Image (spheres, rainbow, N blue to C red):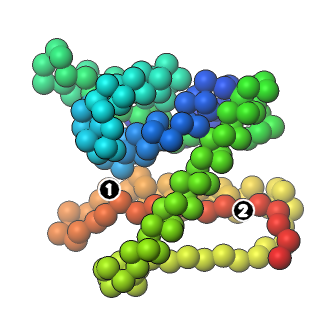
Amino acid sequence: MTKPEIRTLRDAAPLAALAHPFRARMMDALKVDGPSTASALAARTGQAVGNASHHLKVLAAAGLVEEAPELARDRRERWWRLVNAGTRWSSVDLEDLAAVDAAREAVALGARRQTERVLAWLANEGSDPEWDDAAYATQTWLRVSPAELREVAEEVMAVFERWSDRDVPDDGAEREPVLVFSRGFPCQP
């Protein structure tokens, strides 16, 4: 079972694993859909099964995913799940230059993926009025210290975690995976 805590990364191996586009997609699929097989992940992401299997092994070696043998129906079936509910890192905690480089790549990949997803959403705007009305974008300017920005981040992450970890009501409402992200950083208008 996925451990509920957020894992703090400090070394290069898991950061380098997260800096790969397909592995990042697989991690997202495991977060959204729960445990899966390489075949199901390959179908979900449009990749070859062998490719999915290889990348699952890389993620496992980095301690990001693990096998879930109790889910297998027979000895040939291999199920995988996330080890932790999520990951985080801070450049000040990284142990070596390789970890710093891998973290930069993982952050850059995440930013590109977020931008691509926003642009894809905007390109399809108008296809579902109910989701169009529910979707949002917001930004604001704050005047804060680094300590205060950390406090803002903790509050925002707590809201995301509360919604992510909640028991989904069995009320018949259709629910879709929704990407919600937030960034806070020093900037000038």
Residue 184 circle label: 2
Question: Whole-percent x and y of residue 140?
Answer: 71, 77
Given the current orientation, which residue lies at the most extreme left position? 73
Question: Whole-percent x and y of residue 60?
Answer: 45, 23
Given the current orientation, which residue lies at the most extreme top position? 75
Q: Is 32 located above or below residue 94 in the figure? A: below
- Whether residue 34 is visible here, answered yes or no, is no
Q: Amino acid at mark 2?
A: Gly
At horizontal 28% and vertical 66% (from top left) the residue drawn is: 175
At horizontal 50% and vertical 41% (from top left) the residue drawn is: 21
The number of numbered badges drawn on the structure is 2
Q: Amino acid at mark 1?
A: Asp
Screen quadrant of the N terminus: top left
Q: Nearer the viewer, mark 2 or mark 1?
A: 2
Question: Whole-percent x and y of residue 30?
Answer: 37, 41
At horizontal 58% and vertical 50% (from top left) the residue drawn is: 110
**Circle 1 — which element?**
loop
At horizontal 61% and vertical 30% (from top left) the residue drawn is: 16
Position of 175 compared to 145: left or right?
Answer: left
Q: Which of the two residues, 123 or 187, is positioned nearer the viewer here?
A: 123
Mark closest to the chain's N terminus, 2 or 1? 1
Estimate how packed mark 2 is, as few (under 14), some (14 to 19) or many (20 or more) residues with alpha carbons within 10 Å: few
Residue 167 circle label: 1
Report how far apart the C-alphas of labels 2 and 1 lie in the structure.
29 Å
Question: Whole-percent x and y of residue 52?
Answer: 35, 30
